[in-house]
Image (cartoon, helix red, strand yellow):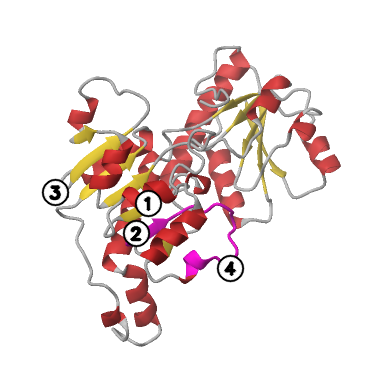
Amino acid sequence: MPPITVAFLGNAKSNETASRFKVMKGLAPAGVNVRLVDSSVSEGELIEQLADIDAVIPAAGGRLTVPVARHAKKLKLVQLMSAGYDALDVPGLNGIGIQVANNGGSNAISVSEHTIGLMLSVYRKLMDSWDTTRQGKWREGLDRLPLRQEINGKTVGIIGFGNIGRQVARRLQGWDVELLYYDVVELVPGRDQELGAIRTDRDELLKRSDIVTLHVPLDSTTRGMMSDREFGLMKPTAVLINACRGPVVDEAALIRALKAGKIAAAGLDVLEKEPTDPNNPLLKMANVVVTPHWAGGTAEANERAFRFAFSNFRRLAEGRQLLSIVKPED
């Protein structure tokens, strides 16, 4: 394979960036030269560091802008570590001859496990019980919370039945739940039956589900797709789980729905603005659990993502067609 130089673009002072780069370096095959490039430097310094780079993997917070990329004359590929690509100007990068590839399957297991963790955290009041125990209060005040519930016997509606949505369904097999799903894309016939899920339209799913979990990409068709109308269709006892992208949910509408009792609770790994304002009302609500965009990025997911990335770098070096190329509004 012809040699290729790849930049892992992130905050070099971050422990997470450093640990991920260590994994990347350990997995790099012969002929792939990997380099940690600090995204926190000035634009001019960043341009200098990317001068001889063939491909970039953005780490958390390591965004690549079109003005910077325009100066990286050798750069041909931005390889993402996960499915989401909304942080990049994909049309702008494409316009200067740089392709963008995502990595949809690598973190599907991690995100699906975290999704179920959010369901359990909301239903079993895990965060509240931990807080009181840690403070030495044992069960003090917990009797004022709504009674804990089981997932068993509930109807779970999955909006977005791609890699992650299907992994959620797979992991809920054996939990004795009814699984509904909605997706704009038709599955291969029989695939949903293998997972024990029933296809329905979105409004019917919202009306019937005890738990609604979101697993869609963020684009013009999904931005704000959960708003006042949608919350009005849900059961007052229903729970919303969001582990895809924050702007898929109209946050102000969610706050209104929770305050008015239109839905019972929410478990969120993503918010409209990240990091969120410390005064965000969602952080103060007893019926909301929030984690800091933490669902993916496990050790296993990182390894899967890097292995996929290296296979794409090999294709790039050999002039072959790249895998999982993103097209705007995919």
In this view, the mark in front (3 or 2): 2
| Dot placed on the residue nearer the N-terminal end, 3 or 2 | 3
Q: Which residue position holds label 4? A: 278
In this view, the mark in front (4 or 2): 2
Instruction: Determine the CA span between mark 4 and mark 2.
Output: 25 Å
> For the residue marked with disc 1, what is the amino acid?
Phe
What is the magenta segment's predominant secondary structure? loop
In the image, what residue occupies the spot 55% across and 25% down? 326
In the image, what residue occupies the spot 23% across and 29% down? 192
Instruction: Determine the CA span between mark 1 and mark 3.
Output: 25 Å
> For the residue marked with disc 2, what is the amino acid?
Lys
Magenta stretch holds residue 316: no
Q: Residues within 10 Å of mark 3 (few under 14, many from 20)?
A: few
Instruction: Determine the CA span between mark 4 and mark 1.
Output: 25 Å
Q: Which residue position holds label 1? A: 231
| Dot placed on the residue nearer the N-terminal end, 1 or 2 | 1
Q: Is residue 6 above or below residue 234?
A: above
Q: Which residue position holds label 2? A: 262
| Dot placed on the residue nearer the N-terminal end, 4 or 1 | 1
Instruction: Determine the CA span between mark 1 and mark 2.
Output: 7 Å
